[in-house]
Amino acid sequence: MEMTEIILKKRNGEELSAEEMDFIAISAASGNVPDYQLSAWLMAVYFRGLSRKETSFLTRSMARSGERLNLKSVKAPKVDKHSTGGVGDGVSLVLAPAACACGIAVPMMSGRGLGHTGGTLDKLESIKGFKVGLSSAEIVRQIKTIGVAMFGQTQKLAPSDKKIYSLRDATCTVESLPLIVASILSKKYAEDINALVLDVKFGSGAFLRDFKKSRALACALKETAESLGIKCAAVMSEMEEPLGCVVGNANEMAQSLKILLGEESPSDFMEVLFTLGGQMLSLAGRASSAIEGAEKVRRALKSGAALKKMAEMIKLQKGDVRVLLDPDRYLPKAPFLKVFRAARDGYLAKLDSRIIGYSAVRLGAGRGRAEDEIDFGAGICLEKKVGSYVRRGDAIARLYSSDRSKINNAMKLFETAVVISDKKPGKRKLVREIIK
């Protein structure tokens, strides 16, 4: 099989076979095809697209380019959740142990933050010693032992995705819908899961801001997942303002641990948590409906069962379990602080999540480039949410950094995210639609 023939075939708009997709994925993983040919193929896909069948073939081939987890001996239904990314979205940190406490196995492969969006792995690593780089054998052993593991992509799980992902960025083909679908689902298929719940964001802080484009992605992900034998539901949730009240790695980890410890929590965060948890348990057959599933997740939090699962996971993944005794004491805290205050009386009409995400990056909480180091204690604590009435001088947010010089720069950007109005904004629907 020749790569030039495959490039020509796709350039001319013809459909590629499963064998040709296997060739592409194996060649990407092994390096047997030069980057310039893979780049040419990516550009052909960008302009010509892939059919549903081709997208399914590519996803399966990318997953099979390396090893798959073997969880067949795990009797509980195996369910994962994937978010397309947002600001303040630490839901996975609570959801994984809570859903596991309700009787399902949760192998959750996660990623790192890049740009304005945060990454689950970075949040977990704010716990001293927490190990996210698990081998496949360690993941399987942990799932068998406690039912939940949160980890990064290994060198052997969907290795072709790493090569293709890097070339998509370099060739400006990131926005290609079938390539997005194959990238996300190849890693999920490699987890050997039975079901998947997708949290597809739209709005300012989302990867795709437009609702229609985000919905098209959700439908494509669901259709492809089901073609691979994975039950799937997609939740369309808004990301116009940050989810919850904090942004930044240790901040979000602390908020999540406090929820597990039974403290009062932000209503928008909890709405997304219960919606996703309800769908996970419903798809797994552990609840007769999503409503019943959400109630089970609520009870797992209240009873302490979810907290116990988190404690077991932290211990097995070498993290400092003392963090559960006092998150504020045992998680990093940046020493420098500035308070952003309201410039006038009125209603808080906007907190632009994308701008706030980039403000957090300027503080050191995120990466502008993949190789940038993270300041785990840097971040933003929101004192007010959209719809709140503020008076001139009221604290709207607190900005933290370990570098005093970064705060003024971040404050200037944060200011552009805030709109105060004489008129109270209408309440927007956080969960727009659930696609089942």
Image (cartoon, rainbow, N blue to C red):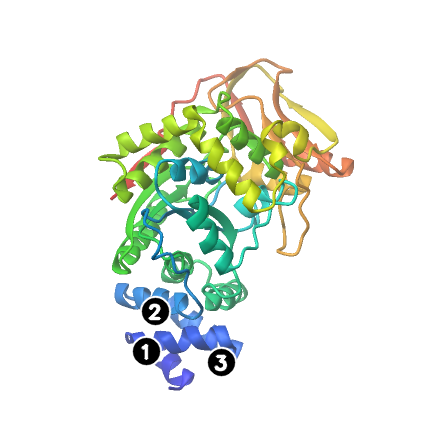
Whether label 1 touches label 2, CB < 8 Å: no
Residue 403, horizontal then vertical, whole percent: 76, 38
Residue 100, horizontal then vertical, whole percent: 40, 40
Q: Quadrant of residue 334?
A: top right
Element at badge 3? loop
Residue at (37%, 84%) from the top-left corner?
Answer: 5
The residue under label 1 is 19
The residue under label 3 is 33
In the picture provided, is 106 more to the left or to the right than 134? left
Whether label 3 touches label 2, CB < 8 Å: no
- Which one is in front in this view, the residue at disc 1 or the one at disc 2? 1
The residue under label 2 is 48
> Which amino acid lies under the numbered mark 1 shown in the image of this protein?
Glu
Residue at (33%, 30%) from the top-left corner?
Answer: 296
Residue 68 vs residue 405, the one in the foreground: 68
Element at badge 1? helix
